[in-house]
Image (tube, rainbow, N blue to C red):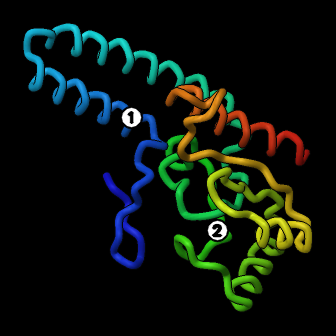
């Protein structure tokens, strides 16, 4: 199911949930078999094998993220709903009120209040987005900065499984470092 934002647009970050990755794998295999029916069985077997890898990695990451369940975190922008849903994480808010929109002073004040009342001490940045303003905000509020990557495509995150592993490890490490 695609998540819909309050402005009516749909959340495009659906690949950040393993259940959706399973569906994407099926759709790719189906398209390949339609385009090249002579090799259909190879495509279907490869898809079945990859879906087993996806399921195994999802189980592994879920186990590793058990201590993080329910810990409130902030994200840079509203890209992490699917990931949070898959792993039982709690996204308490986002730094950016909407994609590409800088926070207003009123939004900053609301976010600071949320940090204080919600006992939030972690905010996740993304390597693709400018974080200068966020870093100053984090320093002023005392929240720790950690990184999540929705896209990958760099060394160490050049496959879907490596990307999801990186993100789960980043959440786990940030929460472990914050202490009880």
Give the residue displayed 72% in from the left and 55% down from the top. Answer: 124
Residue 69: image location, x then y, percent: 67, 45
Give the residue displayed 11% in from the left and 18% down from the top. Answer: 36
Give the residue displayed 69% in from the left and 62% down from the top. Answer: 74
The tag on residue 62 is: none
Q: Measured along the vertical axis of the image, is residue 94 above or below residue 21? A: below
Disc 2 crowd rating (10 Å Cα; few below 14, some 14-19, many 20+) is some
Q: Measured along the vertical axis of the image, is residue 72 above or below residue 7? A: above
Q: Is residue 1 left or right of residue 148?
A: left
Q: Measured along the vertical axis of the image, is residue 144 above or below residue 62? A: below
Q: Which residue is mark 1?
A: 21
* Viewer-closest of 104 and 86: 104
Residue 62 in view (yes/no) = no
Residue 121: image location, x then y, percent: 83, 60
Earlier sequence position, callout 1 versus callout 2: 1
The secondary element bearing badge 2 is classed as: strand
Q: Which residue is mark 2?
A: 93
Give the residue displayed 11% in from the left and 25% down from the top. Answer: 35
Residue 36 in view (yes/no) = yes
């Amino acid at each position: 199911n695609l998540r819909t934002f309050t402005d009516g647009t749909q959340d495009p970050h659906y690949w950040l949930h393993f259940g959706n990755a399973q569906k994407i794998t099926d759709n790719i295999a189906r398209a390949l078999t339609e385009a090249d029916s002579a090799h259909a069985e190879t495509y279907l077997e490869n898809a079945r094998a990859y879906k087993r890898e996806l399921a195994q990695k999802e189980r592994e990451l879920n186990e590793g993220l058990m201590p993080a369940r329910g810990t409130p975190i902030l994200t840079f922008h509203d890209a992490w709903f699917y990931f949070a849903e898959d792993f039982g994480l709690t996204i308490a808010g986002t730094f950016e009120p909407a994609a590409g929109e800088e926070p207003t002073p009123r939004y900053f004040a609301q976010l600071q209040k949320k940090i204080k009342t919600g006992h939030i001490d972690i905010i996740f940045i993304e390597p693709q987005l400018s974080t200068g303003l966020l870093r100053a905000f984090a320093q002023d509020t005392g929240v720790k900065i950690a990184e999540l990557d929705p896209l990958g495509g760099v060394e160490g995150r050049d496959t879907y499984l490596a990307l999801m592993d990186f993100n789960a490890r980043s959440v786990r490490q940030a929460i472990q470092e914050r202490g009880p």
